[in-house]
Amino acid sequence: MRAVLLLSTGWAGMQNAAGRIMRYLTAGESHGPALVGIVEGLPAGLKIEEDYLQRQLARRQGGYGRGGRMAIEKDQIQFLAGVRFGRTTGSPLALMIANKDWQNWQEVMSPHPAAETDARKITCPRPGHADLAGGIKYFHRDLRNILERASARETAMRVAIGNIAALLLNHFQIRGAGYVCALGGVEAAPRPPAWGVEMIRRKTVSSQLYCLDGEAEQQMIAAIDRAREEGDTLGGIFEVVVEGLPPGLGSHVQADRRLDGRLAGALMSIPGIKGVEIGLGFAAAAKQGSEVHDTMRFAAGKRISRASNHAGGLEGGMTNGEPLVIRAAMKPIPTLQKALSSIDLATGKTEDAAVERADVCAVAAAAVIGEAQVAWELARAFLEKFGGDSLLEIEAGWRDYQQLKQDYLGGGS
C-alpha cells in the first residue's frame, strides 16, 4: 500500500513539474488587425516592467537599413489577462500588439467571405521565402496566405514574450545582450574579452547598427546604402552574451534536454537565420584539443574559474557557469526591389518574383530578436531546475542551490 501511495505521489509531482514548464503561442498576420500571444507557466508574483518591454520593442524596430513599415508601426503591448496591478497571477498571460497598418489592409485581409478580392493577390513566389513551399503544403493559390504569417512581423510578439522571460532572469541577476558582429561581408573587430553585458549595452545604445566597432559600422552603413541603390539586400551575423548563469541548466541525459540544441533551435526559428554556433563554433574544428578546451582552477570563494571560454558557457548540453556566447548568421532578406526570376503559378510562365515592402537589412533587429529567443529558452531551463508556482518558491530553491553548490565545491566541508 505504501509503495502504491509513493508511486501515486511521485506521478502527481511529475505532472505538476511538467505543468510548470513555460510555453507560448503566437497568432496574427503581418497586415492583420494585431499580433497576439499566450504564455503559460509563468510563476505568480513576477513584476512586469512595461517600460522595459516597450524599450525592447523599440530596439527591434530600430537599426539602419529598415524599411517603411517601421515608420508606420509604433508597437505597444496591451495585456489582456494574467497580470494584475503589475504582477503575474500565475494564470495564462495574454497580450496583444496592434498593427497600425491594418487600416490600409482591411479589405485585402478581411476575414469575411463576402469581402473576398483578388486585390494584392500573389502568384509569383519569391526565391528564398516561404511562399512556394508553403503554397504547396497548404494548397493555397494566393500566396499571400503564406507570406502574411511567414513574415518577420511576427517576431514583434516574440520580442515581447522573450523579454518577459528576461524579466524573470533579471530577477536572479542573469542578464544578456546582443550586438552585430558582421554585416554584408564587413566584420567588426573581435569583442574584447573584458567587454561583458553592461559594456555591450552601453556601446550599442548609441549605435545605428548595434555594433561595438564604430569604424566597421560606418563600412556596414555604406554597404547598406549601396545595396539599397542596387535594389538588393544584405545579411550578417549577431552575437548574444549572457552572464550570471548557474552551472547545470539543461542536461546531458537526453537529447531533447541538451541546452545547446535547444538554444540553437530557438535561434534557428527566427526567420532568415541559417546558422548557429556556440563559443569557438566552427573555428574549433580547425584547432587541436589543447587549443580549444578551457582549463580550470579554483578561485576565491570556492569558485572554479576558466583560463578561457572557448566552450561559450556550455559543456555536455549544460551551462558550466561561464558566460553564454552564441552567434547566429542571417541570410539577406528574400524580398528584393530588383526582383529575382520566378514562375507565375497562375500561368506557368517565367515572371519576376512578387515585391513587397521590405527592409534592405534587418541584422540589427535580428540581434534584438535573438536576445529574446535566448532569454526565453534559458528561462525555461531555469524554471525546470528551480521551478515553482510562485516567485517565492523559486527564490527559495535558488537560495538552497547556492548553499549546496558551495558545499559541493568545498568538498562537503
Image (tube, rainbow, N blue to C red):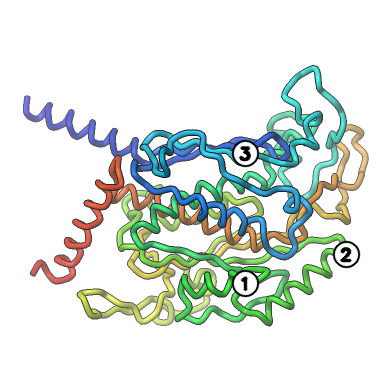
Residue 388, numbered circle: none
Q: Is 135 in front, or is 193?
A: 193
Residue at x 56%, y 52% (from the top left corner): 54
* Element type where label 2 sits in the image: loop
Position of 257 relative to 132 (above/below)? below
Helix, strand or loop at label 1? It is loop
Residue marked by disc 2: 230
The earlier-in-sequence mark between 2 and 1 is: 1
Spatial separation of the CA atoms under disc 3 and disc 2: 33 Å
Q: Which residue is mark 3?
A: 35
Residue lying farthest to the front in this orientation:
85
Q: Amino acid at mark 1?
A: Ser
Q: Identify which residue, 199 or 372, lies in the foreground.
A: 199
Asked if labels 3 and 1 touch by Cβ distance under 8 angstroms, the answer is no
CA gap, disc 2 and disc 1: 28 Å
Q: Position of residue 79 (x, y in %)?
A: 51, 38
Task: Give 265 or 321, whichever is nearer the viewer.
Answer: 321
According to the picture, the residue beneath numbered tag 1 turns out to be 206
Q: Is residue 294 left or right of residue 262?
A: left
Question: What amino acid type is highlighted by mark number 2?
Answer: Glu
Neighbours of disc 3 within 10 Å: few (<14), some (14-19), many (20+): many
Residue 218 % position (x, y): 73, 77
Tell me which amino acid carries mark 3: Leu
170 in relation to 308, above or below = above
**Callout in the foreground (1, 3):** 1
| Residue at left offset 53%, top offset 38% | 95
User: Which residue: 68% across, 79% down?
Assistant: 216
